[in-house]
Image (spheres, rainbow, N blue to C red):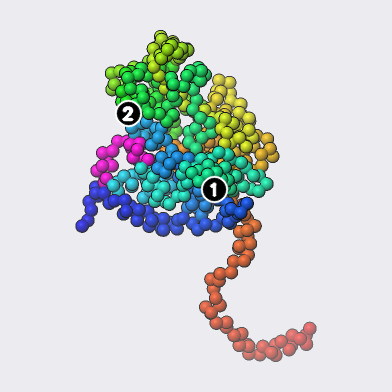
Amino acid sequence: MTQSPTSAIGLPALEARLRQDLAWLELPARHWVPERTYNGQPVIDVAIIGGGMAGLAAAASLTHLGVGAVIFDQSPRGFEGPWATTARMETLRSPKQLTGPALGLPALTFRAWFEAQFGLDAWDALDKIPRLQWMDYLRWYRDVLAIDVRNDHRITAVTPLGADGLVALSVTSPAGEQTVYARHVVLATGRDGLGGPTVPAFARELPRRFWAHSSDVMDYATLRGKRVGVIGAGASAMDSAATALESGAASVDLLIRRADIPRINKGKGAGNPGLTHGHVNLPDEWKWRIRHYVNVQQVPPPRGSTLRVSRHDNARFNLGAPILDVTPVGDELYVRTAKGTFVLDFLVFATGFRIDIEGRPEFAAFSKFVRKWSDRYTPAPGDEDIELSDSPDLGPTFEFLEKTPGACPGLERIHCFCAPATLSHGAVSGDIPAVSEGAKRLAQGLAGTFYREDVEHHYNNMQTYAEPEVYGDEWTPAPPPPALEGENAVKGKERIAS
């Protein structure tokens, strides 16, 4: 029976199609990086810290090029990244048709995965991708590509071993503590990958029972019946406010510094393949100018997330209300703003993340040697930007560079494939639209690095290679041609003349 174009073929059929696509493309390539041991244990080609979307795409790209990759993630299986833990949006903001981490393989796209299960009519009816459904897709992505992810493994130290051409990882897992070795390490650690949540100074002086950051793991049911203030007006602010309202908060006051909420996502105005592939080669001045403009203009919250808040009668949008100070009084907070004083029970800070690599203890062995943009670039007056100044200045394969040459041998073996790479490389290391292009750039750069490092080995392989393609039995040698008439007489006259 022939299926109609709108029917669902099922995941087994899609997976068979993907296997055929990979076979037609001769993917993955055979493993070609020389095996090594160190201290009696095998050395990993590339260790990836973080099993979210970026880490999965990086591992898949490396594997396709014949380079070994192992992911270490501190979360339980199936809960890598923010999607099923700290993210609180109903749907993704990215358009559903973006191919994300599919690496150019149609059968690996979210659309193919969705249509295989629900059919074309359901795809046409879909507006935005539900957040938890995206997580289900990433779980399938991991399984169908057989990516080596080691869950419940927390990295407690990353130490370059410059003289040995390796990086040591101190790992804590249910099996205990161990040290593993890799030739290169990729930090696919998300938006807070080189730092953590940022909050105003006054928040750090408040008792912790009064506040949380929007990225904290938290049961919003604890806010039932409480007067909640949410600081900020971005996507995470709307998601936190809506979740609090849906969990039974008595009221939610959004405290918004600006006089208006941003309306236009300026970053979309330059979104095209030219930006994706060209940003990395722009002059420093243009890199800074573009990213600073996006930061200043700010990205508006998604319309759906904003409507999710405003449909509640007990939600209030307080514009032009920067916080002046907060005073605990018993079990209440007196929050004084430019618009007046609010009496609240709890605050949620949707105030983003900071880059602070030296504040991450697992990076202590190398963090102070990392070159930041502030170490070599001074923006024009008025264009100062703390986020950009603190961003690492990365090489062409997302590798960290030394602030002082020679001060940290082996630093270049650690690669930053997370949000802080944006100023150097563009938005290719974590955002859905261009993550495949970023993963391919990383993998191709690492493949080239491995070949350069092992060129003598590969040259020796070429010299000793002895598999014949021609065996000598494909032809019969011809005899010499017959002598020409009078040839011997001519040769004799030539000898006498000489």
Answer whether labels 2 and 1 touch (C-beta < 8 Å). Answer: no
**Residue occupying image coordinates x 42% and y 22%:** 348
Q: Residue at x 60, y 45 (%)?
A: 167
Circle number at residue 226: none
- The image quadrant of residue 465 is bottom right
Was residue 248 drawn as part of the magenta stretch in this picture? no
Q: Can you identify the residue that label 2 sits on?
A: 304
Point out residue 282 in the picture as x, y percentages from the top left corner: 55, 36
Whether residue 264 is visible to the viewer of this picture, yes or no, is no
User: What residue did someone put label 1 on?
Assistant: 46
List x then y, in percent, for residue 259.
41, 15
Decide if residue 157 is on the left or right side of residue 428.
Answer: right
- Quarter placement of the N terminus: bottom left
Is 127 colored magenta in this rendering?
A: yes
Where is 364 relative to 47, above or below? above
Report the magenta residues as a range: 118-135
Does residue 243 appear to the left or right of 350 in the view shown? left
User: Which residue is rendered at x = 37% and y = 47% of the image?
Assistant: 140
Q: Is residue 165 visible?
A: yes
Report the side of 106 relative to 463 (left or right).
Answer: left
> Helix, strand or loop at disc 2?
helix
Give above or below for 90 relative to 165: above
